[in-house]
Amino acid sequence: MDAENCVIHFGAQSLLLGVIPFLNLKIKELPVFEPNEYFFKNHQKEGEEKWECYARIMRDIMAKEGNYSLSDNTIEDKYEYKK
């Protein structure tokens, strides 16, 4: 019987759970940010709604602070890749 829990096979998940005592975790707490009109005046692109501007900038900040690369793939691209 092939048991699964979400997307990770049970055996792989068990192995990952076994290494938890050996993991190190570094948490970087960023300051709370509340957007204001100055923020939107200086960062909002033409035709972009305020929530889109805020989401774009926060995504960029989190990627920079976490040392992640950004991807413009859509969720549909990810589903297609998974097939």
Image (cartoon, rainbow, N blue to C red):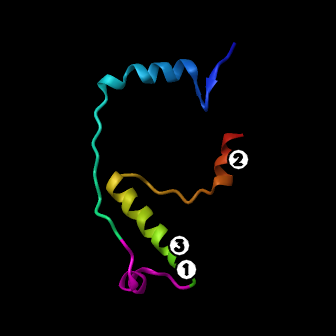
- Judge left or right: residue 79 versus residue 51: right
Mark 1 is surrounded, within 10 Å at the Cα level, by few (under 14), some (14 to 19) or many (20 or more) other residues, namely few
Q: Is residue 57 above or below residue 72?
A: below
In the image, residue 6 lies at what x, y percent?
A: 61, 32
The residue that label 1 is drawn on is 48
Going by the numbered disc 3, the residue's amino acid type is: Glu
- Judge left or right: residue 64 versus residue 15: left
Considering only order in the chain, which callout, 2 or 3, is on the residue closer to the N terminus? 3
The residue that label 3 is drawn on is 52
Going by the numbered disc 1, the residue's amino acid type is: Glu
Counting labels gives 3
In the rendered image, which quarter contains the C terminus? top right
The residue that label 2 is drawn on is 80
Give the SS element for disc 1.
Answer: loop
Which residues are the magenta region?
Answer: 34-46
In whole angstroms, how far apart are the C-alphas of marks 2 and 1? 28 Å
Mark 3 is surrounded, within 10 Å at the Cα level, by few (under 14), some (14 to 19) or many (20 or more) other residues, namely few
Please tell me which residue is depicted at 52% across the width and 73% down the height of the picture.
51
